[in-house]
Amino acid sequence: MNDQVHIDVIGVDGSKQFGCNLCSMLLGESVLLDAGSASMLSGQQQRNVEMVLLTHAHLDHVLELGFMVDAAVASRDEPLRVMGSKACLEIVRKHYMNDLIWPDFSRIKTSIGPALVYETIDDKKWFEIPGGITAWSEPVCHGAGARGFLLRSATGSILHTGDTGPTSSIWEKAAELNDLKLIIAEVSFPDQKTDIAIASNHLTSSLLEKELNKLNRPDIPVYAIHLKPWERHEIEKDITLRFGDRVVILQRGDRLEF
Ligand SMILES: [Zn+2]
Ligand SMILES: [Zn+2]
């Protein structure tokens, strides 16, 4: 039996423009990590998703959760589980699915119960999510209840920073893992916009290099996500100059495994 978990990249762009897809990755078939591009999944893929795991409540990570759960009301056998930090879920409930901007689907009862159930993550503890994955949630430096995740299958672990500026504890936790296979890290801005990156709690290539030095594992491949589309060309140049081929920019359609 193959116990590896596939990561299918649905979208990794750091904002919405023509041809861009906001952050969403399928972990196996049952977990959607962020819902920026949930509508890019087919109906069957959406029905297969048991849980949406949110890094944080910013619009580019939750945008299409509303449409996904709308479609789910009539077609699912189980409520859609939406998991995130306490702060993240409070923001989604209060400012998005609040019966004003969009229905509060946690109160819409169907024959199978509510269409959606919210589940709060306990930070700094391993917890089980569907698909044979164990997860660890670590607060990162960003706002909107932001968390980075360590995700572990039967065959290895990965680090996903989520959106974050410079931070420490997630790198310290990652250093404890002896089966770390890859790192997915945000690089939102080019080096020449470091002031904007710092002000908005994001990373540039140069800031990422400092983050990676905290872990000091140059053998582990790094995949960059969350590039601002209008800065993509500059960020690509920065990454190539600084990292050569150690850091690869992820794209929609890519598949990783751990
Ligand atoms: Zn954000
Ligand atoms: Zn974002």
Image: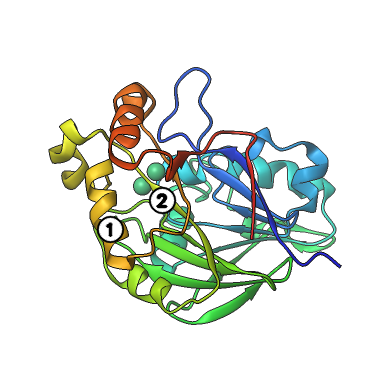
Which tag, 2 or 1, sits closer to the chain's start? 2
Is 245 on the left-hand or right-hand side of 180? Answer: left
Q: Furthest residue to the bottom?
A: 125
Disc 1 element? helix
- Quarter of the image for residue 147 reads bottom left
Is 63 on the left-hand or right-hand side of 235? Answer: right
Nearest the eye: 124 or 189: 189
Distance from the alpha carbon under mark 2 to that under mark 1: 10 Å
Q: Write down the residue under mark 1.
A: 211
- Quarter of the image for residue 246 reads top left
The residue under the point 75% across, 53% down is 29
- Are the residues at dot 2 and dot 1 in contact (C-beta closer than 8 Å)? yes
Disc 2 element? strand
**Dot 1 surroundings within 10 Å: few (below 14), some, or many (20 or more)?**
some
The residue under the point 42% across, 62% down is 148
- Quarter of the image for residue 240 reads top left
Residue 73 percent across, percent down from the top left? 76, 49
Residue 231 to residue 219: above or below: above
The residue under the point 69% across, 73% down is 154
Residue type (three-letter) at the residue carrying disc 2: Ala
Disc assigned to residue 185 = 2
Residue 90 percent across, percent down from the top left? 43, 62
Residue 192 percent across, percent down from the top left? 16, 31
Residue 147 to residue 122: above or below: above
The residue under the point 17% across, 47% down is 198
Is 144 on the left-hand or right-hand side of 180? Answer: left
Residue 42 percent across, percent down from the top left? 77, 36
Q: Furthest residue to the top?
A: 18
Q: Is residue 204 visible?
A: no
